[in-house]
Amino acid sequence: MNHFTRDLLEALPSPEKTKEIVREHLEEAMNAMLKNELDAVLGYQKYQRGQREGNSRNGSYERTYDTEYGEVNLNVPRDRKNEFEPQLFSPYQRRSDWLESMIIELYQKGSTTSEIAEIIEKLYGHYYSKETISNITEATQVLVDQFKSRPLKKRYSILYIDATFTKIRRRNVASEAVYLVLGIDEEGKREILSYLILPEESSLCWNDLFTDIKKRGVEQVLLGVMDGLIGLDDAFLSHFPKADVQRCTIHFMRNIAHRVRVTDRAAILRDLSDWFKSTTHEEIDEKRQNIILRWVKDYPKLMKDYMVRPHLFTFIKYPSSIWGSIKTTNWIENTNKQIKRQMNKKEQFPNEQSAERFLVNQIVIHNDKLNSRIMKGFDAAYSQLQHLFDERYPTPSE
């Protein structure tokens, strides 16, 4: 039984003592490795005559190095020609990669920089400032660049389009729009394709996002599902003119509910819900007229303005197995809620870059989780959707 094994067995009843034993022996091993590295560079061991004339040992300098088991004290040897560079760690490195990896993972899970600093101090007895933690999390910028430049698929059956909001500090703190496009590919797999962070939501800004996904490969889209933001449907169709638009039926019903008396809401919402269960154009027209006749006396302007809104029943052109998925923006709204729940843990972001890094981390986690799943009904709709693609985007004859 060697010295390390004996010490470890004696310390096992005490986790803190065990950790300290590992730290001490790690410190001893790392210092021995540094000496052996210098021996290899010089070509001879200490106290032996040098075989490389003109170069020799030149003392050492002390440095600390943070490891998973605590801080170790190293004596880093030097040579007179300054040719020796330790392979055990890179120049100026003060921590092993485990800490960076843990900090980034905690950050990706939604922990704030203050929470991460507190966790590290409690676990390992070292204090790291919020600034230090932020510097480490900046390594995630590589992930941002990769996400923003990655190529996208040519075909997407559905694009869900929606925005959420988060607080960002510029000169002061304010809520800003986070634009997201979630795509469903030919097989029914979903992923967030792209995003934008801008001070407010407008159809003009959506143009930038549509331009981005087209530039990265999206050419053929069947349907865009969106809310009633003025000009959004026109912006979408200007980029994908062969696509259809489906307005979110839930948003439509909410807008109506806010424009009637509280005592009438339940009844009118029942009528609208039944209307959206229509399966033919004839049934749609009949139920529309019934709703108008019932409510036009009390709400004439509402019936005139809202009951003729376009793009409410586009879904009936598509396979019935996916109607439940394409009538509303629920899919992307649920995604937004999950991402916003994590972003709200930050209370506010110090700048746009910080918000962007955090957002992309959440998007990547979300995509990894969902990209292997087929959305309900899309496997049954595959053949019909392919037929729609072929109709709208025929292969040019040779």
Image (cartoon, rainbow, N blue to C red):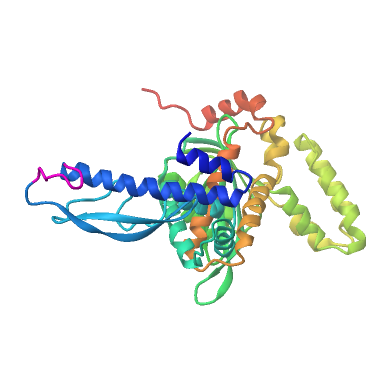
Residue at figure coordinates x 91%, y 59% from the top left: 264
* Highlighted magenta segment, given as a residue range: 44-52
Residue 359 in sight here = yes
In the depicted structure, whether residue 349 falls above or below residue 73: below
Where is residue 66, by image quadrant?
bottom left
**Quick check: is 46 in the magenta stretch?**
yes
Residue at figure coordinates x 14%, y 52% from the top left: 56
In the depicted structure, whether residue 262 falls above or below residue 107: below
Where is residue 231, by image quadrant?
bottom right
Would you say 279 lies left or right of 360 here?
right
Q: Nearer the viewer, residue 60 or 190?
A: 60
Q: Nearer the viewer, residue 71 or 333?
A: 71
Q: Position of residue 222 (x, y in %)?
A: 57, 37
Q: Nearer the viewer, residue 56 or 92?
A: 56
**Quick check: is 115 in the magenta stretch?**
no
Q: Position of residue 233 (x, y in %)?
A: 58, 51
Q: Position of residue 161 (x, y in %)?
A: 59, 49
Quadrant of the frame with the C terminus: top left
Looking at this rendering, what residue extends furthest in the bottom direction?
171
Residue at figure coordinates x 6%, y 48% from the top left: 53
Residue 183 in sight here = no
Q: Main secondary structure of the magenta part?
A: loop
Would you say 111 lies left or right of 376 here?
left
In the depicted structure, whether residue 64 falls above or below residue 280: below
Would you say 2 lies left or right of 377 here?
left
